[in-house]
Image: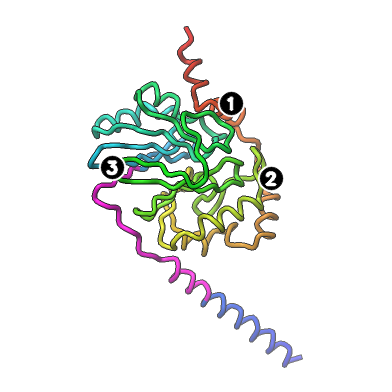
Amino acid sequence: MFKTLCQQYLKSSFSKYNLIIMNSCCKDVALTEPIPFSKDFLFRQMFDPVSSTYTYLLADIDDKTAILIDPVIEWAERDKTIIQELGLTLKYAINTHMHADHITGTGKLKSLLPGCQSMISRSSGAKADILLNPDDQISFGKHNLLVLPTPGHTEGCVTYVCYEQGIAFTGDALLIRGCGRTDFQGGSAEVLYNSVHSKIFTLPANFRLYPAHDYSGRTVTTVAEEKAFNPRLSKSLNEFVDIMNNLNLAYPKMIDKAVPANKVCGLYEVAKEQKP
C-alpha cells in the first residue's frame, strides 16, 4: 500500500514537474522578436466599441496610397477624415469575409472617397468591384498583401499577409486566444482547424497577427503565441471539433441586418439612407 502511494505521488509530482517545464518552454518559444515596420509603411489600428471590430489603415508613406481592411459603416466618416488629413488616397476598401455582426463601411467609403474600389473574396458570395482569388496580390504603392483562403468561420474567409512587414490580418478565422464560431454561413469546425494550421500557423513564428475583433482589449498576437496558448486551436482536431460543437452560442444579433447589406458591400444601407 505504501509503495503504491509513493508511486502515485512520484507520478503526480513528475507530471506537475513536466507541466512546469512545458509551460516554461512554451513561454520561451512564444516570446519572439517582431519584424520592425519599414520607414515607408503606415499602420493604424482603429476600433468600433459596439461590435469590437478592428479596422486597419495601411499605406505607402512615399506615394500616399492607402487601403482599409474591415471598415465599419458607422465609422466611415472617421476613416475618411483620417485619410484626408494624412493626405492619402484610398485605393481599396477590403473585407476579410462577409461579416454578420456589423455592416461594412466599404459602400459608404466609395461614396465619400470616389475612386476607392471594394474587395472581398470570390468565395464569400458577396458583390464587390474586385473579387479576390487565392494567392492574389493586393498592391498599394510598393507594398503588397497576399490573399490566403482560410475558410471555416464562413466559406469566404481570407487572411491577408504582408510578408515584408511580418504581419497578417486574420479576420475571424483566428482571434487572440480564440477563433470565430463555425455554426452558420457555411462554417465548419474541421475546415477552420485545417485552415488555421495549414495557412496561419505555418507562417514565421514572429509574424504579428491582427484579428477582426477582440472582446478583451487585446490588440495583437503572434503565430508563436497562438500555437502555444490558443485554448482551442492548440488542441487536436477532434478536441477542437468537440469544443466548437458545444459552444451553445446565441443567435447573432445583427446577422439578419448585416448579411443582406454585406452581400452588396454595404450599399444596401447607403441606399436606404438616401431615400427621401
Q: Which of the two labelled residues, at mark 1 and mark 2, occupies the earlier sequence position?
A: 2
Q: Mark 1 = which residue?
A: 260
Mark 3 or mark 2, whichever is nearer to me? 3
Residue 25 in the image: state x and y as whole percent: 48, 74
Would you place residue 14 above or below residue 248 in this image? Answer: below
Secondary structure at badge 3 equals strand
Extreme-right residue of the structure? 1
**Image mark for residue 60:** 3
Q: Amino acid at mark 2?
A: Asn
Residue 240 in the image: state x and y as whole percent: 65, 57
Q: Residue at x 30, y 41 (%)?
A: 141
Q: Which residues are magenta?
A: 22-44
Would you place residue 182 above or below residue 130 in this image? Answer: below
Q: Mark 2 = which residue?
A: 248
Q: Residue at x 47, y 15 (%)?
A: 273
Report whether 253 appears left or right of 29.
right
Residue 44 in the image: state x and y as whole percent: 33, 42
